[in-house]
Amino acid sequence: MRIRVLGSAAGGGVPQWNCACRVCRQARAEGNFRLQDTAAVSGDGTAWYLINAAPDVRAGILDTPELAPGPGLRDTPELASGPGLRDTPLRGVLLTTAELDHTLGLLSLREAIRLRIYATATVTMALTSVFPVFPTLAQYTGIDVHEVSDGIALDGGLDVQRLTVGTKRPRYARADLSEEGLAEGGSPKVGGSGPKVGESGDGRGLGSCGRGDWVSALRLTDRATKKSLVYATCLPEWTEDFDAFVDGADEVLLDGTFGTEDELTLMTGRPGTARSMGHLPMSVSREHAGRHPGTRFRFSHLNNTNPAVGDDIVADGDLL
Ligand code: MLT
Ligand code: MN
Ligand code: ZN
């Protein structure tokens, strides 16, 4: 199994375009950038899947030699106009959340001849009825949306297992949907000061996004070598279920949004703890990781406030 990190930053990237914090200033000075969280994974080195599709996914793909298109003989004149020119090793995209930083890049893949997308029913509902990325994309390319669930077999010899690790919705889907409205299965009640989402469309299916499978961890296992990777770059809590999910894995990519619980406030003066934003800080994750000595844990999805450096922090372009 090969895993290539295309982007290792949280939403906004590093540096964030409008941020002059210490980490962003240093990143600009050194030209040391991080694209937003996306990885590419392959069992056989031929069939590749993206895990998430960040807004800057195009730059990540261009920086990844394994994802270059073409039949391998692309300089051969006979093939110069054949369909092989649009051959791509990319077989699909696995989504772990419906957040903008993980999904906007789907729209940048609209040149695809077909696009296979794996997501939970909750994420599919959000990207269909609340923020219609899928119907929009379907106007440009053929899309096949599959439910990502345990036991899915990907091309190239990878098996997928999935665990719901969080129920935090993207802001665009925080419509104050009342549980009552959800239970009735009717159009959701939209109130409060939040955006008026859910008003377009017929509201069908919104009921399923009450608590929902909003945030997933994925475990990918190479059928031939039995090597496995857990991808959990959005992790609100280290539950017993999550502990069992990572047990025995070779590699785990963890949520590195914040180094410590109070980082955001210390660095920017803005209120909010790491956990209140749905991200377990690295200081806590490292303690749990220490109980799995046979597993290599590394952090991705770094926020631009996180100055962490070291062997357990991935960089864009890393091959795990
Ligand atoms: C998150 O990681 O919590 C989300 O991507 C937040 C966001 O960028 O809106
Ligand atoms: Mn994010
Ligand atoms: Zn910054």
Image (spheres, rainbow, N blue to C red):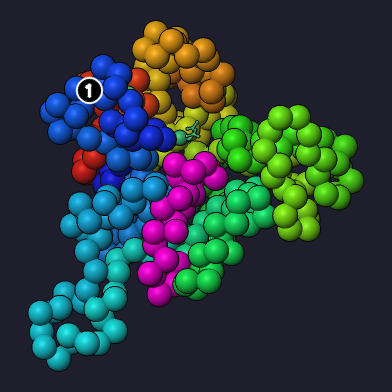
Q: Is residue 211 left or right of residue 288?
A: right
Q: Vertically, is 290 above or below 91?
A: above
User: Residue 298's quadrant in the figure?
Assistant: top left
Foreground: 43 or 198? 198
Disc 1 residue type (three-letter): Arg
Seen at 67% across and 55% down, the residue is: 129
* Residue 130 percent across, percent down from the top left: 65, 50
Quadrant of the image occupied by residue 233: top left
Residue at image point 27% right, 50% down: 60
Q: Residue furthest bottom?
A: 78
Total of numbered circles in the picture?
Answer: 1
Q: Quick check: can you spot residue 24?
A: yes
Quarter-of-image position of residue 48: bottom left
Q: Is residue 35 magenta?
A: no
Q: Using the rendered image of the protein, determine whether residue 121 is visible from the camera's viewpoint.
A: no
Q: Which residue is mark 1?
A: 25
The image shows residue 158 at horizontal and vertical percentages of 40, 56
Pick the residue in front: 241 or 188: 188
Residue 214, position as x, y percentages in the image:
60, 40
Secondary element type, mark 1: helix
Q: Which residue is depicted at the point 37% across and 26% down?
A: 303
| Quarter of the image with the C terminus in it | top left
Residue at 37 percent of width and 16 percent of height? 259
Which residue range is magenta in the image? 93-115
Q: Is mark 1 within 8 Å of ligand 3?
A: yes
Please state the horizontal and vertical placement of residue 49, each as a whole percent of the image.
Answer: 37, 57
